[in-house]
Image (spheres, helix red, strand yellow):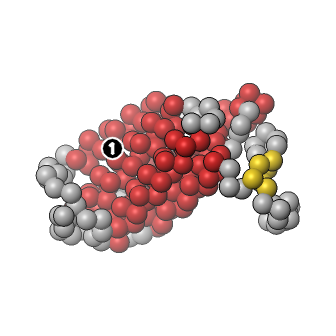
Amino acid sequence: MKIYTRTGDDGQTSLFGGGRIAKHHPRVSAYGEVDELNAAIGVAVATEPTAFESELLTGIQRDLFAIGGQLASPNPAKVAKALQKAEISEDRILEMERAIDRAESELPTLRHFILPGGCPKGSFLHYARTVCRRAERAVVSLSEIETVPDIILQYLNRLSDLLFTLARLANRRQDVTEHTW
């Protein structure tokens, strides 16, 4: 199978389960932003120290593929069997909350806004957080015109909190001072 199909040359794309829509449709924007988020997290994972929360972040990347699959499926009943692999549970959100709590136990209490940046790992995690917020906005926009499972919005909201906290923790462990605004 070739990577190029030429079927999108007219500005349309195929959906999971059938059908075609314009590449500027809010559905495509939503799963495209989630895809970019996944890539941004991939950059953070690949940045030294690579062992820092790599298992947690790689699991999140797998979740984001699942979320993208759900967002690319306007008729989930039609592809229900295939989407079983793409199910996101409340347990995944609870796991992120536990990770946030663990990280916060190592961090000083936040009393001011901080400027994103720091060590490369922390900087890329801050960047991933902003991409996560953009993805969340795109999914919210889609949810205003199409049905989107609530768990996806909850997941993205919690993920941005986790990425922020992990950015702070990465900087702390590298002895990089946070700069306040």
- The percent position of residue 50, horizontal first and vertical second, equals 41, 65
Q: Toward the viewer: 25 or 121?
A: 25
**Apparent side of residue 118 relative to residue 73 in the rendered image (left or right):** left
Residue 124's place in the image compared with 148, above or below, is below
- Nearest the eye: 138 or 127: 138
Please state the horizontal and vertical placement of residue 97, each as a whole percent of the image: 34, 38
Which picture quadrant has residue 19?
top right
- Secondary structure beneath dot 1 equals helix
Viewer-proximal residue among 59 and 13: 13
Q: Amino acid at mark 1?
A: Ala
Residue drawn at x 59%, y 49% as measured from the top left: 30
Left or right side of 167 for 141: right
- Which corner quadrant holds the C terminus? bottom left
Q: Which residue is mark 1?
A: 99
- Across the whole image, how many numbered discs are drawn on residues? 1
Q: Quadrant of residue 145?
A: top right
Rendered position, 38 above or below 4: above
Report whether residue 151 is seen. yes
Q: Measuring from the top left, give residue 12's x and y in whole percent.
A: 79, 55
Residue 31 appears in view:
no
Q: Residue furthest front?
A: 145
Residue that appears at 71% across and 32% down: 76
Q: Position of residue 152 (x, y in %)?
A: 52, 37
Instruction: Please state which of residues 147 and 98 is positioned toward the viewer in this rendering.
Output: 147
| Mark 1 residue crowding within 10 angstroms, few (<14) / some (14–19) / many (20+) | some
Residue occupying the point 26% across, 41% down: 101
* Residue in the picture at 44% in, 31% down: 91
Q: Is residue 57 above or below residue 141?
A: below
